[in-house]
Every structure is written in structure tokens, then in C-alpha cells.
Amino acid sequence: EVPVVARVSRSIGLPTWAPDVYGLGLRWAQGDDEVDLQLASTGIGVPGRFLLLPRLTPTRATLSSVVPYRTPSGPIMLCARTVPARRLPGGLRELRRAVGVEPWELRLYFASPGGRWRPFADVRLESPHPEDDASLRFDIDRRPLRGAETYPSVRALRRPSYRLTQG
């Protein structure tokens, strides 16, 4: 077991009654390093796993890496799905409250860009902070998974938005 810090966001910031792209950031320690994983609501199949998909709630959402990571054995995608199935509220405040009452359990999967998803870890989110920590920022380029990195072209595309949002 490894402690995980998580942050859920509604990426566009639309009102809770409107569909939005859900984001999930996860951080944990791996040896002396911290590792970040950023996922967003997408489809599960091909081509849906490469497309952001607004949802009313994260209830049945697939949260994926959207673009593959580069690994020594080739490109891989990562995703998370709620297990067992559970109804979750769409608003972040309500979601925090619900997770405080009953932990949100997710299964993490990996796949080649066109391949079948294979499970590799379970995550249990519980005891949320009462208020969202706006200073908590995730950066998969500065805190990468060991053995996996983002492609240089993806880093170059992402860099301007990271500068704007993360200061």
C-alpha cells in the first residue's frame, strides 16, 4: 500500500448541471521521488480514449492519459475506472462529501494505444480535505512515472498551458 494524494477537477469550470471534462491528478512517493499521474474523462475504446469527453458526473467515466507515454517496450496508455460501479455526484463539493462518507475506489489500467486495457493497481480515495487546495498542482513532466515519459512533442504542446496555469 502506498499513500496517494488526489485532486479532482472540472476542467472547463462549467456549472455543475452542465457536462464537463473531469480531471484526476494522483501523486505518490516512489523511492525518494514523487510521481504524478494526470487523467481526464475520455472514452474507453479507440478512438475515444484519445478524445476528451465531457460528463455530467464521474460515475461511469473512463479517466485516461489521453496521449501515450513512451516506455522501453513501446507506447502505453493509462486509465482509471470506478470499481465497483457507484453513483457519484457531479459537483466537486458534493463529490468531496460523498468520498468522505464512502471511499471512491478506482482501478488503474494500462494498454497499448490500440490494445486491451489490463489492470495493474487499485486506488482508494478517502478522507478528502474540507477545502480544495488550489496550490496542489500536478506535472507529469517534472514528476514522471519511472520507466515512462511523455513524448517531447507532447511536452512542447503542453508547456505554454502549464506556464499559464501553474505560474
Image (tube, rainbow, N blue to C red):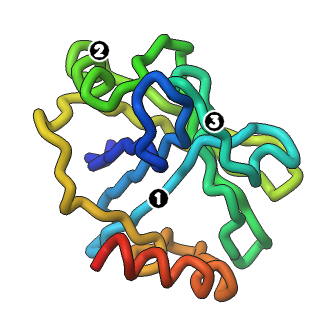
Residue at numbered disc 2: 102
Sequence-earlier tag: 1 or 2? 1
- Please name which of the two marks, 3 or 2, marks the residue nearer to the observer: 3
At horizontal 41% and vertical 44% (from top left) the residue drawn is 13
Image spot of residue 19 (x, y percent): 56, 31
At horizontal 67% and vertical 48% (from top left) the residue drawn is 52
Q: Check disc 2 and report its element: helix, strand or loop.
A: loop
At horizontal 41% and vertical 27% (from top left) the residue drawn is 16
Q: Nearer the viewer, residue 61 or 113?
A: 61
Count neighbours of disc 2 (C-alpha within 10 A) and say few if under 14, some if 14 to 19, many if 20 or more. Answer: few
Query: Looking at the picture, which amino acid does disc 3 mark?
Result: Thr
- Note whether 35 is above or below 111 in the view shown: below
Q: Check disc 3 and report its element: helix, strand or loop.
A: strand
Mark seen at residue 67: none
* 24 displayed left or right of 97: right
Query: Looking at the picture, which amino acid does disc 2 mark?
Result: Glu
Gap between marks 3 and 2, in whole Å? 20 Å
- Please name which of the two marks, 3 or 1, marks the residue nearer to the observer: 3
Q: Nearer the viewer, residue 76 or 86?
A: 86
Residue at numbered disc 1: 37
Residue at numbered disc 3: 62
Gap between marks 3 and 1, in whole Å? 14 Å
Query: Looking at the picture, which amino acid does disc 1 mark?
Result: Leu
